[in-house]
Amino acid sequence: MADEPVSERGVSKVGGLTLLAPLTASQELELLPRIALGRQSAQQLLSSELTPTERRRLQRRVNEGRDAESTLLRATLGLVRRRVRERGFPFANEDLELAGVEGLVNALRRFDPDKGVRFSTYAYPWITKLVNQAIRQHAGLSEHEMTQLLALQKLLRTDVGRTFGAKEVASKLGVSLATARDLIETNQRFADRSVDEFDEEKAVSATAPSDTHEAPRWVIDELRALCGKDFDAFWQFAHKTMSLEELARGKGISRQAMTKRIEKCRRAVRESSQAQRLQAWLDQQ
């Protein structure tokens, strides 16, 4: 699976699996009963007191449920790719995507369709956990070091237009000045290597079919600068992977407050010097 191309004849792949367009909330709801019935039927098939006709009926339901699970999983693969790219670490994206897919599969196995939560919402922590573990193993970082480095990156995203000094990082993160300097140096080392790998990736992607669900780096950088701390929420909303209600619940605020935050991001996009380019890209999502 790991040797399969990311894109072949216009078919986008993540971790060797074919990526589907994200599902709307209503499309996902249509799949959930089939998944639940398929799992229930699989349990019923364990019984030894079934007639051949009953077994065939149950097996059809199991197959339909598995097809629905496959559709749900492949429609959420874009979340894996975005999580890997947002992390910005210089390791082979394919290795990290495989880790993200593993997290996605783990989430699918444990997902309860009756809980009333979007699968993308449930899967996101699983994807993040496995991607972070893969990064930590590649980088040779301890769990504590990885936690600190992610905290630094979160701080840097609050204002991408300026440079944070070691004293400010130490104060914001509650670490020593020496630790802050080490974190900044480590993060910069990753960033420098990312630029080198980006040039190679750019050369490859120039001949590859474009993927409308894959954001160019300038889009991510521009939206981060415009949205600040609300970038993640606006990103999820723009890609329809989370509803306003889910975003608000995740932030612990009201739907009305989340709506205001999203509208603030929209206004920033409209007033940006890159407004036309950004809007053209967003309209494709």
Image: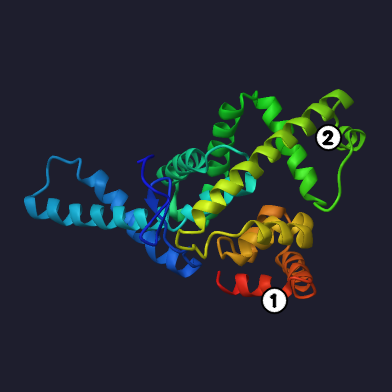
Classify residue 285 by image quadrant: bottom right
At horizontal 34% and vertical 58% (from top left) the residue drawn is: 68
Could one spot residue 123 in this view of the protein? yes
Q: CA distance from mark 2 to mark 1?
A: 37 Å
Q: Position of residue 230 (x, y in %)?
A: 74, 58
Residue 44 vertical position relative to residue 33 in the rendered view, above or below: above
Q: Nearer the viewer, residue 264 or 60?
A: 264
Q: Quadrant of residue 242?
A: bottom right
Judging by the rendered image, the residue that carries numbered circle 1 is: 276
Going by the numbered disc 2, the residue's amino acid type is: Leu
What label sits on residue 173 in the rendered view?
Answer: 2
Foreground pick, 185 / 244: 185
Q: How is the image coloured?
A: rainbow
Q: Is residue 73 left or right of residue 161?
A: left
Where in the figure is residue 224, as x and y percent of width and height? 74, 57
Please give the name of the residue rendered at 62% of the width and 70% of the height, measured from the top-left corner.
282
Horizontal and vertical percent for residue 184?
79, 33
Q: Nearer the viewer, residue 148 or 47?
A: 148
Crowding near pointer 2: few (<14 within 10 Å), some, many (20+)? some
